[in-house]
Image: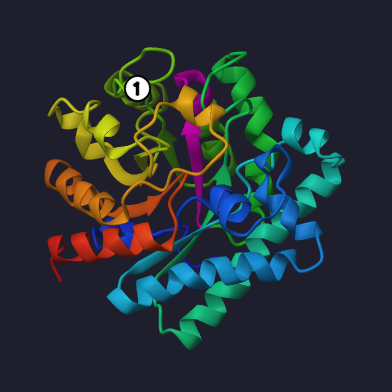
Amino acid sequence: MATLFRDRLPQLDGRLFLTDGGQETTFVFHDGLALPEFAAFDLLRRDGGEAHLAAYYRSYAAIAAHDRVGLILEAPTWRASSDWGQRLGYAPQALDAANRRAIALLAHLRDELRGSLGLDAVVISGCVGPRGDGYKPGQLMSAVEAERYHRRQIESFSQGDADIISAMTMNYVEEALGIARAARRAGMPVAISFTVETDGRLPTGQTLRAAIEHVDNETGGYPIYYMINCAHPVHIERALDGGLWQNRLRGLRANASAKSHAELDQATELDSGNPAEFGRQYAHLKQRLPQLNVLGGCCGTDTRHVASVAAECAGLFAG
């Protein structure tokens, strides 16, 4: 095992770190790939799938190298938990192997990128997604149930080269809390990323502030930081109230589209928004959130959006 940063995450130093855009929307709408259950990790068992994933990550590494910033490689494992794996025909052991293979691919890429592009800070993140739909809570779990459900995937990541766990698109607080506890049990740092609706609140109606404070209070502040993903920058701004809790927000992976989750759920065409405006909106949010330094995209975004974010935001970071 060649874990480099699990005990000293370089993004905590405040320099700009880029990550990728909307993996699944890129593969489906731009690359024409079929992704049953929106599961990018399933590419790992297809002929040429691993090469396709590697090429995707290299495209974002080139942006990070151009702007001389750090890079977080997010594993394509948002759907690689047991319920989704069963729907795709994965036995538990095969799903464990897929999660480990995803991290091994990123570890190999990190070695390559350090040599070919001179990237000195490449962090490997094991991505955990919601048990249910990312846009709506559906059947709610208790924190205890959520910890039990997500533990196996997180342990798979902890046994490999992952530096951090990233829980993406959390739409209710109990699942986020369960993941934080499972990560602590596995000895892994964890970033919790909530999603919000057009009003800036979680799909349950809870405020982002209340969700973050709840997880922090129940875990002694265990999450290394918090993020927001799968919401447009305009909607994200509505979640902010100027309180000190906002200092816990370090990451942002916004949607390209200003449509609601319900509208996006029914969409048959990709709404890529305006990449140039997207970068400017990130720069505006950075002014309101000084701790923000992990920047990427979510649904509908691609290299154009992340390059725009880098161009607009790089000058806002000292050094």
Residue at x 35% of width, y 14% of height: 206
Is 208 left, or right, of 111 in this rendering? left
**Label 1 residue SS:** helix
Count of numbered tags? 1
x and y percent of residue 42 in the render? 74, 51
Q: Nearer the viewer, residue 296 or 172?
A: 296
* Residue 2 seen anywhere in this rendered image of the structure: no
**Mark 1 Cα within 10 Å, few/some/many (few <14, many 20+)?**
few
Is 92 left, or right, of 243 in this rendering? right
* Residue 223 seen anywhere in this rendered image of the structure: yes
Q: Which residue is mark 1?
A: 217
x and y percent of residue 167 in the render? 50, 39
Q: Is residue 171 above or below residue 45?
A: above
Q: Quadrant of the N terminus?
A: bottom right
Residue 171: within the magenta?
Answer: yes
**In the rendered structure, which segment of residues is drawn in magenta?**
163-177
Residue at x 67% of width, y 26% of height: 148
Amino acid type, residue under disc 1 in the picture: Asn
Determine the image quadrant of residue 33: bottom right
Residue at x 64% of width, y 60% of height: 103
Determine the image quadrant of residue 120: bottom left
x and y percent of residue 201 in the render? 33, 20
Q: Is residue 290 above or below residue 73?
A: above
Residue 33: within the magenta?
Answer: no
Residue at the bottom extreme of this rendering: 116
Residue at x 35% of width, y 57% of height: 305
Q: Quadrant of the C terminus?
A: bottom left
